[in-house]
Image (spheres, rainbow, N blue to C red):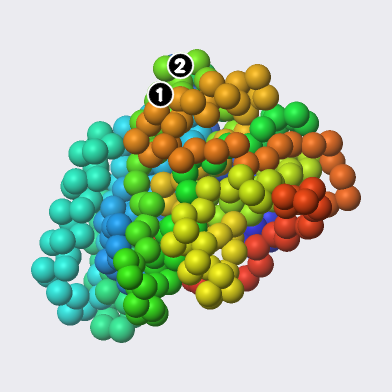
Amino acid sequence: MRRLIEDRIWHLLRESHLSGQGGDAARLPRPDGPIAMTTDSFVVTPLFFPGGDIGHLAVYGTVNDLAVMGAIPRWMSLAFILEEGFPLREFDRILKSIAAAAEVTQVRIVTGDTKVVPRGKADGVFINTTGIGEFATPAPPGPSAIEPGDLLIITGPIGRHGLAILAAREKLGFEPPPQSDCGPLIEVFRDLRDAGLCPRAARDATRGGVAAVCHEWAQASGTTLRIEESELPVSAEIRGACELLGLDPLFLANEGTAVLAVESALAIPTLQLLRSTRLGTNAAIIGEVRHRGVVPVVIGNRLGRERVLEEPTGAPMPRIC
């Protein structure tokens, strides 16, 4: 995905205000202060999964992209592509989830669109959104500001959304079934902002998981990121399922978990604050930033040995968001 964007899209459609901060939102200039804008499409299958559904995902995924940029989500558009014959009871269920998530996040749905395509052309329903937010002060400067000595923090256990989707899609029969972490990150970043704890960079670890975020940041900052394997928060259920299926939690998608790069002096206060929030009780310091070495990202084990953490390639599990 990153190669597709960089090699075929970026050099043709690049705008100056899209660069600098990285992430999934643009910083748009205006006379009375910049605003953030993001867009996303949701094609998850199944539409309903343990811990959420496509409606929750559409709202939380959109507002999270704004929140990690340091913006307060304000407005959102909502467009549906519906397959002919899609059951209205399921559509109503999705709409109720959207309304509930919008209320939780205090984002206003102000415009939208609906299209219907022939049966078999849309797998039920696809949703496209655009979110607009107002930047708060301070806002993370972005991955290019990451420096050697900074520490990496994760806001919660990893791998939950990706495994929840896989288990539901393939009917793997895990008991209890894995639960997605689908949820809003707004309160986490609001509390950090109120406490004056501004990370250098923040990103919700969606497609490609934590590994994808680390590679993106290493490229943007010209550093090497080192992950400490023993510090990764992974629940026993997720770890066991990953071992059984031959998966690595670092590569699995999350939908309510973010990675932060923070100055070393702010790491402990940031960690303490995160652990006091509803979504950050299992936050952990998972690594550090080093001067650029031979490879961009490494992972260390309890014996002090390191191995290369490769960038995610391909899509071992598509349609997860």
Query: In the image, what residue type sits under mark 2?
Result: Ala
Name which quarter of the figure residue 95 lies in: bottom left
In terms of secondary structure, where does tag 2 sit? loop
Q: Mark 2 highlights which residue?
A: 195
Label total for image: 2
Residue 223 appears in the picture as rendered: yes
Q: Is residue 281 above or below residue 313?
A: above
Question: In terms of depth relative to the viewer, which is nearer, 74 or 320?
Answer: 320
Residue at 38% in and 78% down: 172
Quadrant the C terminus occupies: bottom left
**Quick one: which residue is furthest to the bottom in this view?**
120
C-alpha separation, residue under disc 1 versus residue under disc 2: 6 Å
Query: How far across and down, in percent of the image, does residue 9 sit?
Result: 63, 57
Quadrant of the image occupied by residue 221 = top right
Q: Position of residue 240 (x, y in %)?
A: 50, 66
Residue 70 vs 57, above or below: the answer is: above
How many C-alpha atoms fall within 10 Å of the one at disc 1: few (<14), some, or many (≥20)?
Answer: some
Residue 149 x, y percent position in the rendering: 75, 29
Q: Residue at x 46, y 25 (%)?
A: 273
- 231 vs 71, nearest the viewer: 231
Mark 1 near mark 2, Cβ–Cβ under 8 Å?
Answer: yes
Q: Where residue 191 is drawn, which disc sits there?
A: 1
Does 224 sit above or below residue 197?
A: below
